[in-house]
Amino acid sequence: MSELPEFTKNQLALRNGQDKPEIWVAYQNTIYDVTESGLWKNGKHYEHWAGQDLTEELEDAPHTYAVFSRLKVVGTLKVV
């Protein structure tokens, strides 16, 4: 099994739906591609913005980790 690439918070921030064609979000140190999701059009989903780590923001979200299991994993968030 190949190891996933690591991305910094700055690299993740560029995938915000505005700067590059990819739209990514991080959750619990895993980066997910939400580009094809209609829920993330233009990099925004309700009050959440793409291109960032949403772990803390989603602590009180009405859904569970199962939402992320449907998304493509593109890498891990580099912890510095």
Image: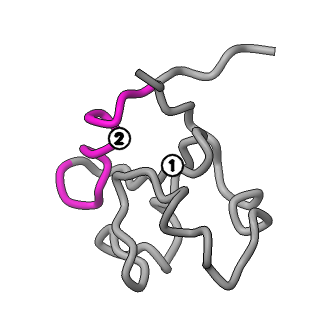
**Does residue 51 appear to the left or right of 40 in the view shown?**
left
**Does residue 27 appear to the left or right of 14 in the view shown?**
right
Q: Which residue, given by chain and number where applicable, does mark 2 sit on?
A: 12
Find residue 1 and report its horizontal and vertical position in percent.
81, 15
Q: Which residue, given by chain and number where applicable, does mark 1 sit on?
A: 26
Q: Residues in magenta?
A: 7-19
Q: Are marks 1 and 2 in contact (CB under 8 Å)?
A: yes
Amino acid type of the residue tagged 1 in the rendering: Ala
- Badge 2 density bin: few <14, some 14–19, many ≥20, Cα 10 Å: many
Q: Residue at x 69, y 60 (%)?
A: 68
Whether residue 13 is in magenta: the answer is yes
Amino acid type of the residue tagged 2 in the rendering: Leu
Q: Give the mark nearer the N terminus: 1 vs 2.
A: 2
Whether residue 62 is in magenta: the answer is no
Q: Residue at x 61, y 77 (%)?
A: 60
- Total number of numbered discs in the rendering: 2
The residue lying toward the viewer, choosing from 50 and 33, is 50
With respect to residue 74, does 24 lie above or below?
below
